[in-house]
Image: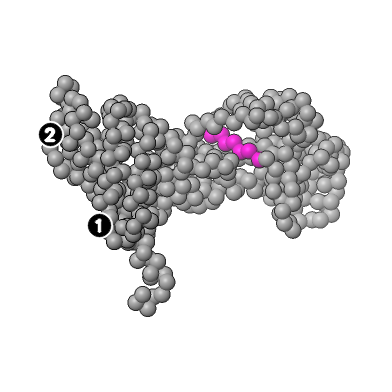
Amino acid sequence: MDGNGMPAFQQALRSGLNKICCTIQQRVMEAVDDQLRENLSMRKGWVVERRNDPKTILSPFGEVRYARTLFQNKKTDEYAYLADRFVGYTSHQRLDTLLEADLLEEAVDKSYSKAGKSVEDQTGIRVSGQTVLNIVRKLQPEKIELKEEPKVKKAVRILYIEADEDHVPHREKGVSAFEQRLVYVHEGRVKVGKDRYELIGKKYFTFPPGTPSHVIWDTIWRYLDVTYDLEQTEYIFISGDGVSWIQAGAEYIEDARYVLDGFHLRRAIFRAAGADEEKRKKLSEAVFNGRWAEMNNLLSAFLKEAETESRKKTISDVQTYLNNQRRGIRARRKYGKLLVGCSAEGHVSHVLSARLSSRPMSWSYLGANQMAHLRVHRENGVKLSQFYLEQSGQKRKEYVSQHIPQNAMASISKAVGSSFETLGNIPSFSSGSKGWAPLLRRMSNAVFKF
């Protein structure tokens, strides 16, 4: 192992296995092409126009180069590579679907450019950031609707809905940042460590800027109605920083109660009182006990003491904010024993900001919304690569069925599976009944089975 130990051996092994996989895929494609070229019954109406045209496809193992036949349809005068159509490759397709799925997973946590580069170490090929972006665009994650109708609705006494937004920088200079909204539903929390809690039954939703409040809360209501036996639910609490679209949830969802979250309430008090502990204590007592006149008197006194215009503006803004949040503060005092604490800021940071706003990058409205949906789907338990493969597989079936006779599918699959016997020429693949050829044949049958 030339002195570099096990890592060097593993690198060589990975490289060698990747080359073997590329060879196998090449032989599969050429075997399909052979069957279509040699059997007229599998391609009625098509005649051979030209042989051995090269094509390169980028796979998770590296570049796969193979030769295939160009056919002409005598009735329509159409030209096509039927082997490509058989496996679902379109005319200008450069990336294999599995590689696209892998890149999609990478893009959820990395910039498009870094996601494209991430496959280089394993495959020796590099994909551009624009190509990765095109994969996301093709998936259209913002339009994915997963039907979730449990057989039995949950009976839960208290439901919590928490909401906040991420401020995403716009890619056009001079255009202000925009809000990507996050809403999540849960059933409470359980302690999983010394200072750590985990939410029970959490479900995330995200919405782009400009989404009307009634659309947001109708979406949440429909989820609640499908998932829970709401006749058994005594309380529904909606928590957030008090902006109008969050408070609107209590108007759209029957019997829901809006509660101002503790983080924003404490921050407002701190902004007004500053570092003076005595001022903070007096203001906190007035606010938490709903003594509004006392609260306003204290804030007016703070305002008179302020020495700068910026300080005066801060106190004035806090006074307006606290007066506008009386309903949420009263609810917090009334239902305090039933609340579990709003962690919306942390969830926004983890689900949205980590990819959208915590790094020096900027976004379009569409790009941010699509990435937000990708991350929300993943948090909701969706295996994105598998979903992409299933969606692409359905499109492939539709595409193939339009171009390849159904009765030809089984014949080609069987023939291609048998062609793996030629791999027995490789010593490692020909160790008797336990050789690799039977396994590879089963793999082929699985790939081409419809």
Residue 195 placed where, x, y %?
Answer: 73, 56
What is the crowding at mark 1: few (fewer than 14 residues within 10 Å), some, or many (at least 20)? few
Query: Does residue 20 appear to the left or right of 36 in the view shown?
Result: right
Q: Which residue is at 84% across, 54% downward?
A: 278
Q: Which residue is at 18% across, 22% downward?
A: 76
Q: Nearer the viewer, mark 2 or mark 1?
A: 1
What is the crowding at mark 2: few (fewer than 14 residues within 10 Å), some, or many (at least 20)? few
Residue 201 placed where, x, y %?
Answer: 68, 40
Residue range highlighted in magenta? 202-209
The secondary element bearing badge 2 is classed as strand
Residue 80 magenta-highlighted = no
Q: Which residue is at 44% across, 39% downward?
A: 388
Residue at the disc numbered 1: 425
Residue 65 placed where, x, y %?
Answer: 24, 49
Question: Quick one: quadrant of the N terminus?
Answer: bottom left
- Front residue of 209/173: it is 209
Query: What is the number of the mark on residue 49?
Result: 2
Query: Does residue 228 appear to the left or right of 92 in the view shown?
Result: right
- Front residue of 170/321: it is 170
First-in-chain label (2 vs 1): 2
- The amino acid type found where label 1 is placed reads Asn
Using the image, determine if residue 324 lies above or below residue 345: above
